[in-house]
Amino acid sequence: MDRLKTAFDVLAFVYVLLVFPAAVYCLTLHVALDCWRRMGGRSLWFALPIWGVCDAAMLLFRHPLFAERFGRNGFTSAVGFILLILAAWLEVRTRRELGLRRLVGLAEVGSPSSRPPLVVTGIYAKVRHPRYLGYLLGWLGVSLLAGAYGILGLAILSFLLYLMVARLEEKELEEYYGPEYSTYARAVPRFIPRWRRKARPCRSPHDGGEHA
């Protein structure tokens, strides 16, 4: 059991090292977008120092992250794994439908005139930011697996960062795509999908039953 808990802690910390810097990078990218555009694709090299600083900070404070615990058991572990699976599924769908160029920020730092068409199908027909939703589910998953308040705190901080990033992205997309994006944003929720019932076809009084 102790080995399993240690494995969960390692999984949670690896997730922190891989995912938390992405939130900081995305916010930096959109806050200073005009500066990044002047540098073009070379601006992506600045992602490496950002990643390095964030990971160095996480390594420095790794013990406080796991110092305070809340209860974890078989149920929380099962829910954590399910959330991680959902997060992985959303990441795969997003990469397939959006493409790597957009995911790493090349579309943002490139010329606005070279932007590809707006994606409104597939998973993007359900939510406007499926990748950020996946990150949130992943954070909640590792928080339940580790049972650490520090990891849960990072999950909340990451969500707040991605909420700011999402709003900045939407402002940029509306400026570029205009009414097309405005219409899409009104119809599709930001993070939480709407589950609509399929409308039942209207039945005629003579449909079904016995015939005279």
Image (cartoon, helix red, strand yellow):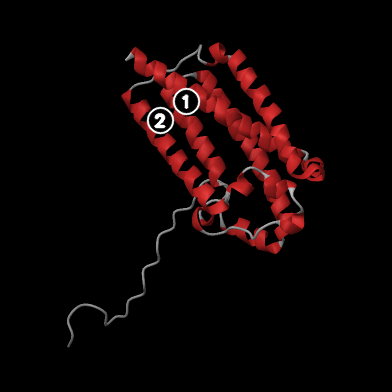
Q: Position of residue 167 (x, y in %)?
A: 68, 44
Q: Are marks 2 and 1 in contact (CB under 8 Å)?
A: yes
CA separation in Å, label 2 and label 1: 8 Å
Q: Residue at x 72, y 57 (%)?
A: 114
Q: Is residue 138 above or below residue 118?
A: above
The tally of labels here is 2
Callout 2 environment at 10 Å: few (<14), some (14 to 19), or many (20+)? many
Q: Position of residue 44 (x, y in %)?
A: 71, 38
Q: Is residue 209 above or below residue 36?
A: below
Does any portion of residue 147 appear in the rendered image?
no
Check disc 2 and report the residue beneath it.
80
Pick the quarter of the image with the N terminus.
top left
Q: Position of residue 83 (x, y in %)?
A: 42, 36
Amino acid marked by disc 2: Gly
Quadrant location of residue 65?
A: top right
Check disc 1 and report the residue beneath it.
143
Does any portion of residue 145 appear in the rendered image?
yes
81 and 196: which is toward the camera: 81
Amino acid marked by disc 1: Ser
